[in-house]
Amino acid sequence: MADPKYIASGDLYEANAALCEFAGHWDMDGDYIRCRKCDRAQLTNYAHFQFQHAQGCAVAPTSDPHPWVTFVRLVTPIIEAVEKAVPHD
């Protein structure tokens, strides 16, 4: 088996940086996304609803209202880069 190929891409670099920033605010917990500050979670089934922080959460006023949607947007360039790099039969 050949060594894995490193995927070099400016778009991928930007996506990785944005994903790291996102992870500073949110935790992935299976099919839940959780605010790191108030620990409130949202199930994927409710991704189209605005995230509901716990009362008094300090980051709620400036937080992403739809973190699942943002997460999908962040991983899309990564998925596309990997798809291009994977050999197809």
Image (cartoon, grey):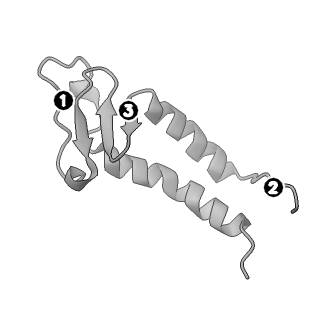
Q: Amino acid at mark 1?
A: His
Q: Foreground: 46 or 74?
A: 46
Q: Foreground: 77 or 86?
A: 86
Where in the figure is residue 39, as x and y percent of width and height?
27, 25
Q: Residues within 10 Å of mark 1 (few under 14, many from 20)?
A: many
Upstream in sequence: badge 2 or badge 3: 2
Where in the figure is residue 34, as x and y percent of width and height?
31, 33
Q: Residue furthest front?
A: 1
Residue 33 placement: quadrant: top left
Question: CA–CA distance between discs 2 and 1?
Answer: 41 Å
| Residue designated by label 3 | 26
| Residue designated by label 1 | 53
| Residue designated by label 2 | 4
Q: Amino acid at mark 2?
A: Pro
Q: Residue at x 63, y 52 (%)?
A: 11
Q: Residue at x 49, y 32 (%)?
A: 21
Where in the figure is residue 53, as x and y percent of width and height?
18, 29
Upstream in sequence: badge 1 or badge 3: 3
